Amino acid sequence: MSLHLHPPIPAALEPQLLLLPLMGVSVSAGFPSPAEDWAEERVDLNLRYVQHAEATFYFTVSGDSMVSPIAERSIPDGATLIVDRALSAKHDDIVVAVIDSDFTVKRLYCRNKRLALVAENLAYPPIVMGDEQELSIWGVVTAWIVRPR
């Protein structure tokens, strides 16, 4: 299955503030520890993850080309991408690109005058850009949201 993206959804320019509790303790991923019963502060996810509201869009991922055996690099089917169009893409960024009028998400490879879009899933070969192809970097993925259930 190849990966494609649903049309972009713009971030709200002036989103309604939604303050969610941020606990003052970290969550142990090893042995359990007692948790505190109160939140130290409240945080709005827009303030944490959206740097340029007017240039930020959300995409829903469809496909498995960005699924990686390295958990922190893995973007599963159904994940929501946060994409900032105000950022300049650089080597090793995850980008939303348009190749010959089709949206895709891949890791950008830019070395020694070579340009390629690389999937995290090793079953997919890199897309090496040829002279006949038209490539546009639409935006840089700054974060993704995954629903574990």
Image (tube, helix red, strand yellow):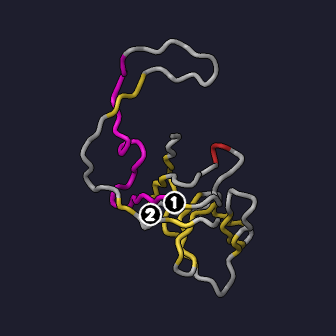
> Percent position (x, y) of residue 67?
65, 53
Q: Label 1: how many residues lie within 10 Å, few (<14), some (14-19) or many (20+)?
A: many
Residue 74, placed above or below residue 37: below
- Report the quarter where the N terminus lies: bottom right
> Would residue 45 be counted in the magenta stretch?
yes
Residue kind at label 2, given as amino acid type: Arg
Residue appearing at x 53%, y 23% in the figure: 27
Q: Report the residue that reaches farthest toward the bottom.
A: 132
Please indicate whether residue 1 sits to the left or right of residue 41 in the image. right
Task: Assign a secondary structure to mark 2.
Answer: loop
Residues in magenta, as a range: 38-60
| Towards the viewer: 80 or 116 | 80
Q: Are marks 1 and 2 in contact (CB under 8 Å)?
A: yes
> Percent position (x, y) of residue 25?
47, 20
What residue sits right under mark 1 in the picture? 140
Residue appearing at x 43%, y 14% in the figure: 36
Residue kind at label 1, given as amino acid type: Val
Label tally: 2
What residue sits right under mark 2 in the picture? 85
> Would residue 69 be counted in the magenta stretch?
no
Whichever of callouts 1 and 2 sits on the residue coming sooner in the sequence is 2
State the image quarter where residue 124 is shown: bottom right
